[in-house]
Image (cartoon, rainbow, N blue to C red):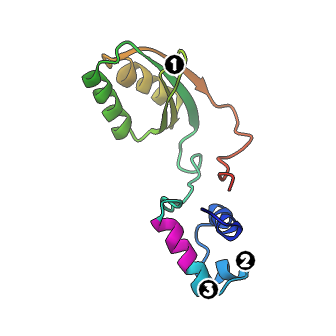
């Protein structure tokens, strides 16, 4: 179980994963060694899965963000496995969710241009035997960035 100090530690790390044990200790009113041990315990228990840098897509030349809904034509295990392997190897597909409802998958993609998005849809996704239909939603603006999880 998480106590209030663990929750505060997790919240602080979600805002800045580079906080040192000394900085965490100061924020949590703990010694640096206590803060470090808590962080290590939360990592070992799987509360913290890893640390990543958040990159600026636009600065990297990725001007188009889109959400792509995929409706499957088949749920045959080999075809689904081939489709999920495709999701894993395509760098422009940054997230994939399996859904209930009409669409089976929701993909978050980043592309350099609309032409690149079109190629991804027309030449990569639609030719997959398991795929029946694809719908895309181009992001015009993002009002809220991926926020930290509530702790």
Name the residue nearer the viewer: 1 or 103: 1
- Left or right of 134: which side holds 125? left
Q: Are marks 3 and 2 in contact (CB under 8 Å)?
A: no
Magenta span includes 69: no
C-alpha distance separating marks 1 and 3: 48 Å
Name the residue nearer the viewer: 108 or 37: 37
- Of helix, strand and loop, which one carries label 2? helix
Label 2, on which residue? 27
x and y percent of residue 50 in the render? 48, 61
| Residue for point 28% across, 23% down | 77
- Quarter occupied by the N terminus: bottom right
x and y percent of residue 67 in the render? 56, 29
Q: Is residue 148 above or below residue 18?
A: above
- Left or right of 17: which side holds 5? right
Magenta part of the chain: 37-44
C-alpha distance separating marks 1 and 2: 44 Å
* Main SS category, magenta section: helix
- Of helix, strand and loop, which one carries label 1? loop
Label 1, on which residue? 103
| Residue for point 68% across, 31% down | 140
x and y percent of residue 129 in the render? 30, 16
Q: Residue furthest front?
A: 1
């Amino acid at each position: 179980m998480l106590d209030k100090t663990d929750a505060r530690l997790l919240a602080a790390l979600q805002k800045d994963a580079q906080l040192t044990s000394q900085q965490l200790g100061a924020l949590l009113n703990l010694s640096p060694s206590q803060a470090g041990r808590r962080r290590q315990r939360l990592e070992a228990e799987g509360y913290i899965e890893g640390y990543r840098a958040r990159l600026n897509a636009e600065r990297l030349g990725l001007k188009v963000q889109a959400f792509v809904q995929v409706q499957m034509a088949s749920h045959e295990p080999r075809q689904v496995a081939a489709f999920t392997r495709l999701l894993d190897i395509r760098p422009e597909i940054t997230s994939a969710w399996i859904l209930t409802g009409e669409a089976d998958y929701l993909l978050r993609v980043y592309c350099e241009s609309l032409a690149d998005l079109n190629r991804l849809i027309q030449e990569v996704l639609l030719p997959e035997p398991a795929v029946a239909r694809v719908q895309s939603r181009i992001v015009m603006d993002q009002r809220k960035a991926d926020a930290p999880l509530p702790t």
